[in-house]
Amino acid sequence: MTTPSATPEDIIRYRTFISGTLVPALQGLEKEQQRLEQVSTSCREFAKLVSTHDSGPLPILVEHDSGSLPILVDIGQGCFANAVVPDPSTFVVDTGLLGVHVRMEADEAVAFVAARANLLDRKRVIVQSKIDVVRVDLEEAGALLSHLQTLLLDPHSTDLR
């Protein structure tokens, strides 16, 4: 029976695989998971804010004397600008597909955004399962790298743990 051996090149190749493949894959999946969470949360906040109740629309949708609605709009980096919504009974909704936006009545927008949030939540479950797989792969790869390093230092060791 031959004793397994490891070369410094094996260790370099394995480290390169871990740092060049597994770690970036995990980082990309975690970034996607965070993006899905942010969009889903925004969808749910919008639906909650705009949804109608038995008593009628929320105060934000009540028309003002001019028929328009003044509001603050987040323009990024914590900065806000004054804006006017000319018709607060309709919304232009981002469909989430290739930058397509659709004008919808408030009740349609709420239903659409709630459905989109549910879809995003299902995608988050799928991404989380991929994250779990990559984390296990990283753990196993780390253990195998450690074993390769042990073999390099002590070629007669056969402990595979």
Image (cartoon, rainbow, N blue to C red):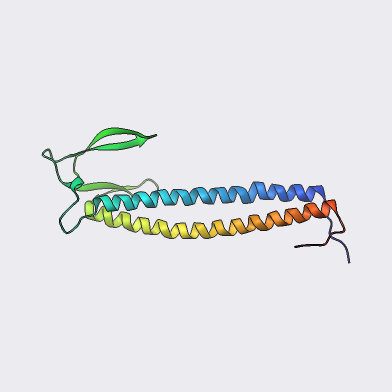
Residue placed most toward the observer, 87 or 53: 53
* Residue 153: x %, y % from top left: 84, 51
Q: Residue at x 16, y 54 (%)?
A: 56
Which residue sits furthest bottom?
A: 1
* Residue 11: x %, y % from top left: 76, 49
Q: Work out which quarter of the rendered image holds the C terminus and state it.
A: bottom right
User: How many marks overall?
Assistant: 0
- In the image, is 160 to the left or to the right of 90? right
- In the image, is 72 to the left or to the right of 161? left
Q: Work out which quarter of the rendered image holds the N terminus and state it.
A: bottom right
Q: Is residue 118 above or below residue 41?
A: below
Q: Residue at x 18, y 47 (%)?
A: 59
* Residue 9: x %, y % from top left: 79, 48
Q: Is residue 126 above or below residue 35?
A: below
- In the image, is 132 to the left or to the right of 82? right
Q: Residue at x 49, y 60 (%)?
A: 126
- In the image, is 21 to the left or to the right of 53? right
Q: Residue at x 85, y 54 (%)?
A: 154
* Residue 15: x %, y % from top left: 71, 48
Which residue sits furthest left?
A: 65
